[in-house]
Amino acid sequence: MAKGPKKLDWLRGYASIYMVFLYAPVILLPIFAFNNSTVIAFPLKGFTTEWFSSLMDNSALHDALGNSMIVAVSTAMISTLLGAFAARAGVRYRFPAKRGIMGLILLPLVLPEIIIAVSLLVLLMRLGMSLSLWTVIAGHVLVCVPFSIAVLNSAFAGLDQSLEEASFDLGETSWGTFKRVTFPLILPGVISSLLITFTISLDEFIIAFFLTGTDVTLPVYIWSQLRFPAKLPGVMALGTLLLLLSITLLIVAEFFRRRSAQRRGLDASTTEGLI
């Protein structure tokens, strides 16, 4: 009878150690960002906000941030649009090789990003295309569409089809039905998809590193700064701001996911039905 509690204690201990190992670097990031020293080590020298202030005068950082915003916003909009098409087709319609086609679309979820990046680079070079922000957007869309489909699948699966049929019966057009009935009901899922794909694109490094041209994105810029020890505190400060932004976006995305689940009467505390 004692084996049950002992096993439970062991699992709790394992989970605690795992969480500490996983999140310790994240906790150390803001600590060193406020440290009054260019050396990233203990003991701390003192408290300062100098590294955050220096970010305001860094024109190269501003350019990289602007490039990342262009890429992330474009990726989020295109990925959500394509994800909506694929999710609706997958939920509502039957067509030949449906499982195979949907599996192919979701394949980037399980492929290593380094393989995707190198393959896209080789393809673009063979086609004679120059590297730019548009090639980065294309790579990010390829990676983000499966995440959008995973979110929007749940939104379309929980949509009562009889509401659309009632709209048609009342003489509404297909576009009018989508605008007045379908879209408002799946809006929480759309917003969640936009936020998640935006966050993934903003943080993505490997594909951007291989496919970017002269206009680097923010993660590539951060990587370039890691070679200079004197730049590390500024990178820590920038990383802290990005961490707060990512957490905020994910919290907002989770809020809309739970709101969408509650509208359909599902258990909002689980992720069942997303994938």
Image (tube, rainbow, N blue to C red):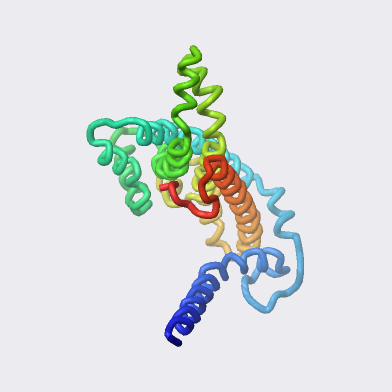
Q: At 47% from the left edge and 34% from the top edge, which residue is drawn? A: 159
Q: Nearer the viewer, residue 93 or 225?
A: 93
Q: Nearer the viewer, residue 267 or 123?
A: 267
Point out residue 91 in the picture as x, y percentages from the top left corner: 37, 35
Q: Answer with the quarter of the image where residue 42 lies.
A: bottom right
Q: Is residue 262 visible?
A: yes
Q: Residue at x 32, y 33 (%)?
A: 128
Q: Quadrant of the N terminus?
A: bottom left
Q: Is residue 111 above or below residue 27?
A: above
How many marks on residues?
0
Rendered residue at 27%/36% (across/down):
98
User: Which residue is at the front of the view, 149 or 216?
Assistant: 149
223 horizontally vs 52: left or right:
left
Outermost top residue = 171
Looking at the image, can residue 140 be seen?
no
Instruction: List the single residue furthest toward the bottom.
Output: 2
Could you tell whether 135 is left or right of 239 in the image? left
- Residue 82: % across, % down: 42, 33
State whether residue 94 is above or below residue 65. above
Tell me what residue is drawn at x 37 percent, y 49 percent: 109
Residue 33's x, y, as percent?
67, 63
Examine the rendered structure and indicate whether residue 103 appears above or below residue 165. below
x, y percent for residue 157: 43, 38
The image shows residue 52, relative to residue 152, as above or below, that is below
Residue at the outermost left position: 96
